[in-house]
Image (spheres, rainbow, N blue to C red):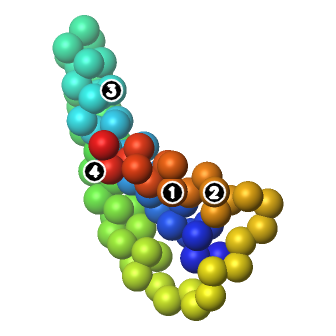
Amino acid sequence: MAQLRDFLVANLRHHHGTEDGDLWPRIVAVAPAAERGLGTLREEHEPLDAALDLLAAVNLGGDEVEDGVGEAAPAQVSVAAA
């Protein structure tokens, strides 16, 4: 469960980071009117990121993993950190 949680947290953080830092600025560059709506979405990331922090801090104990999720999680974490 801990590895699955870490996989989900890392990927959602990566998703938010790429939207806020890469995708949305590109959209605004070609469609400035979109900035208002994207700003609202960016604001929604704040409480979601806080919830991810809380989830990441939960001690789930043990490292039981099924169906190969454990192998996928480290690769995604390294991508998210890049």
- Which image quarter holds the N terminus? bottom right
Mark 2 or mark 4: whose residue is earlier in sequence = 4
User: At numbered mark 2, what does the secondary structure look like: helix, strand or loop?
Assistant: helix
Q: Residues within 10 Å of mark 4 (few under 14, many from 20)?
A: few
Mark 4 or mark 3: whose residue is earlier in sequence = 3
Is 72 placed left or right of 26 in the picture? Answer: right
Mark 4 or mark 1: whose residue is earlier in sequence = 4
> Circle 2 is placed at which residue position?
71
Q: Residue at x 56, y 57 (%)?
A: 73
Give the residue type at disc 3. Answer: Leu
Q: Residue at x 39, y 61 (%)?
A: 48
> Circle 3 is placed at which residue position?
23
The CA distance from mark 3 to mark 1 is 24 Å
Residue lying at the far top in this picture: please name it.
30
The quadrant in which residue 71 appears is bottom right
Give the residue type at disc 2. Answer: Glu
The CA distance from mark 4 to mark 3 is 15 Å
The CA distance from mark 4 to mark 1 is 29 Å
> Circle 1 is placed at which residue position?
74
Q: Position of residue 69 (x, y in %)?
A: 68, 59
